[in-house]
């Protein structure tokens, strides 16, 4: 029997859903006895320090779409370590294809993390369809993406696996502002898809009635119009003493331990790891009804689901939790049990290894 040797490929190690999952997979495979490697093509980041020492590591420093030096470096690494499975995440599908063409015997698995699954009609398909002739399998992060791949791409083996989450970073460096047990947190990079403005519109009304409650936004601010809009909103509505920004942080467990309610106000999602992290931290949640969010909280039984882009509904849901310690505790425990039962590393890896061995 061939010994499986797996290489994860990801474009960066900045903190994001696809990046976190790629690192978690690489680490977890070594935990269960597989030879595991990870290749970062373009940019290292904070997640580099969460890669286990027994995971093989390669940084390509890829400068352009077709970077012959980077491709040669990757191909030599694959040959040297006798890699036979390449697991390419998100936009690294192209470099995964290149290494497959240079090493035809490997099996190429593509993991589709596309976050705008509510807007698939806008997705560019031509290149992906060409690439998909060379995929041994496709893994989708939600059912919508699975159906889309089955309909539009050439690979016949398409799977949906629930994402999984675990806390490996146990440091305690990020101290949240505000009053204990009165903090709302959102883990999300500042991209239009995440719709922070919807949340701010809701919170601006909440804070008038509940001035002790604060909002904590963890994620990367960009030098773009969307981030400027958010900062301008906070200034315009004089929320600087109630809304706090922390940038990218890695001590997520500690941040969530200091929080009382988790929220995601997104316009579109796949299966957000932040929502699973809230559950692992026993946080009650309010989430938009997009992607797999409703399924994660069992359609409202272990969290409150609201329609996207509806700040009034979001406000009312948050106030429902603010007003009831009992509801916060009950929802938090139910959410925790769901995540442990259905989004565990063991369940994910069992399914993943079956795909690797097809």
Image (cartoon, rainbow, N blue to C red):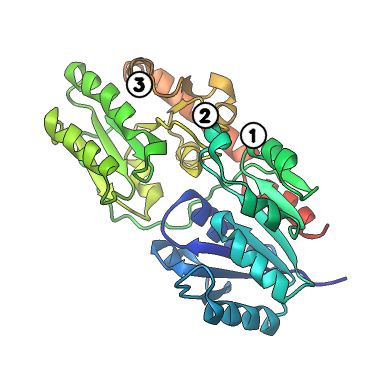
The residue located at (55%, 26%) in the rendering is 294
Q: Is residue 269 left or right of residue 344?
A: left
Mark 1 or 3, which is nearer the eye?
1
Asked whether the residues under the numbered discs 1 and 3 touch, taking CB atoms below 8 Å apart as contact, a structural biologist would say: no
- Quarter of the figure with residue 278: top left
Mark nearer the N terminus (2 vs 1): 1
Give 307 or 46, whichever is nearer the viewer: 307
Q: Residue at x 27, y 47 (%)?
A: 224
N-terminal of the pair, mark 3 or mark 2, is 2
Q: Nearer the viewer, mark 3 or mark 2?
A: 2
Q: Which mark is residue 290?
A: 2
Badge 3 local density, few (<14 within 10 Å), some, or many (20+)?
many
The residue identified by callout 3 is 318
Q: Nearer the viewer, residue 217 or 156?
A: 156
Measured as percent of width and height from the top left, residue 50 is found at 46, 64
Asked if one can make out residue 89 in the rendered structure from this viewpoint, the answer is yes
Above or below for 201 versus 62: above
Report the residue at 69% width, 42% height from top: 149
Task: State how far apart marks 1 and 3 are (Cα).
Answer: 28 Å
Asked which secondary structure carries label 2, the reply is loop
Task: Tell me if label 3 and label 2 are in contact, CB under 8 Å.
Answer: no
The circle on residue 230 is: none
* Label 3 – label 2 distance at C-alpha: 18 Å
> Image height check: is 269 above or below 198?
below
């Amino acid at each position: 029997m061939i010994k499986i040797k797996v290489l994860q490929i990801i474009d960066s190690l900045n903190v994001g859903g696809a990046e976190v999952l790629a690192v978690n997979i690489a680490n977890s495979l070594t935990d269960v006895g597989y030879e595991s490697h990870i290749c970062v093509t373009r940019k290292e980041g904070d997640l580099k320090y969460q890669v286990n020492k027994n995971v093989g590591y390669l940084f390509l420093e890829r400068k352009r779409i077709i970077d012959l030096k980077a491709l040669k470096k990757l191909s030599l690494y694959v040959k040297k370590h006798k890699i036979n499975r390449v697991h390419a995440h998100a936009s690294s599908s192209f470099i995964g294809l290149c290494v497959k063409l240079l090493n035809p015997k490997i099996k190429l698995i593509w993991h589709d993390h596309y976050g705008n699954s509510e807007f698939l009609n806008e997705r560019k398909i031509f290149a992906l369809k060409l690439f998909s002739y060379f995929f041994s399998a496709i893994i989708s992060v939600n059912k919508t993406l699975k159906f889309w791949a089955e309909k539009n791409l050439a690979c016949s083996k398409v799977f949906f696996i629930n994402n999984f989450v675990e806390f490996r970073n146990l440091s305690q460096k990020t101290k949240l502002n505000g009053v204990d047990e009165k903090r709302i947190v959102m883990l999300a990079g500042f991209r239009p898809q995440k719709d922070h403005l919807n949340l701010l519109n809701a919170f601006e009304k909440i804070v008038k009635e509940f001035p002790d409650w604060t909002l904590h936004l963890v994620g990367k601010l960009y030098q773009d119009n969307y981030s400027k809009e958010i900062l301008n909103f906070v200034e315009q509505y004089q929320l600087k003493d109630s809304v706090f920004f922390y940038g990218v942080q890695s001590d997520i467990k500690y941040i969530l331990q200091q929080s009382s309610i988790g929220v995601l106000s997104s316009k579109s999602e796949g299966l957000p790891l932040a929502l699973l992290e809230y559950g692992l931290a026993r946080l009650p949640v309010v989430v938009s009804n997009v992607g797999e969010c409703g399924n994660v909280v069992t359609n409202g039984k272990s969290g409150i689901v609201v329609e996207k882009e509806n700040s009034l509904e979001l406000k009312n849901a948050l106030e429902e939790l603010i007003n009831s310690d009992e509801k916060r505790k009950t929802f938090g425990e139910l959410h925790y049990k769901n995540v442990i039962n259905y989004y565990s590393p063991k369940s994910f890896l069992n399914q993943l290894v079956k795909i690797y061995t097809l």
